[in-house]
């Protein structure tokens, strides 16, 4: 079984489409139920809530359900780990967040220092 995580890409079997739709997991209720952001065959984005996640072969995925793509199923069967873009380790995710927070804080401080230096300049006369 492939464990669903936020950000993973799956197929969604829309009853109105003859092909599976590209979908992204946006919330995980359980290993069997997720919320999705789905792209229609026209490229429009819509959401589906409480979608069953089918763990069988993708070609047997029932309408109204999500399933893993064949490549993902092959990778899982071979024991390969998800690629870095599919699932970040918790420590890497924390590191990226800390780096992002530090960069944002530096920008804020830079702006504050610039504002202070502008305030300390004598007004220019005409």
Image (spheres, helix red, strand yellow):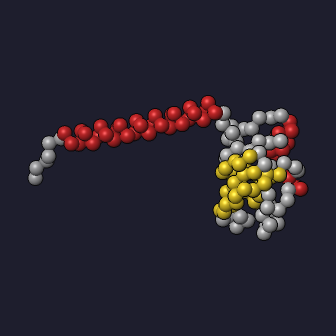
| Above or below 90: residue 40 | below
Residue at horizontal 87 percent and vertical 49 percent from the top: 56
Residue 37 sits in quarter: bottom right
Q: Position of residue 21 (x, y in %)?
A: 75, 60
Q: How many marks?
A: 0
Residue with the most extreme left position: 126
Q: Position of residue 125 (x, y in %)?
A: 10, 49
Q: Quadrant of the N terminus?
A: top right
- Position of 117 relative to 11 (above/below): above
Could you tell me which residue is drawn at 44 percent across and 39 percent down? 104
Residue 3 left/right relative to 43: right
Quarter of the image where one finds residue 2: top right
The extreme bottom residue here reads 16
In the depicted structure, whether residue 58 falls above or below residue 63: above
x 77%, y 58%: residue: 12
Report the residue at 80% width, 66% height from top. 15
Report whether residue 20 is seen: no
| Whether residue 41 can be seen here | yes
Q: Is residue 73 left or right of residue 92?
A: right
Percent x, y for residue 32? 78, 48
Q: Nearer the viewer, residue 50 or 115?
A: 50
Comparing 48 with 93, the one in front is 48
């Amino acid at each position: 079984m492939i464990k669903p995580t936020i950000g993973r890409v799956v197929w969604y079997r829309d009853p109105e489409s003859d092909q599976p739709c590209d979908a992204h997991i946006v919330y995980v209720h359980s290993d069997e139920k997720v919320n999705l952001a789905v792209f229609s065959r026209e490229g429009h984005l819509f959401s589906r809530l409480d979608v069953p996640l089918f763990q069988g072969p993708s070609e047997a995925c029932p309408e109204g359900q999500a399933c893993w793509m064949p490549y993902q199923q092959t990778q899982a069967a071979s024991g390969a780990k998800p690629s870095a873009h599919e699932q970040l380790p918790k420590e890497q995710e924390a590191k990226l967040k800390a780096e992002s927070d530090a960069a944002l804080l530096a920008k804020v401080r830079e702006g504050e220092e610039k504002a202070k230096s502008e305030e300390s300049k004598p007004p220019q006369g005409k």
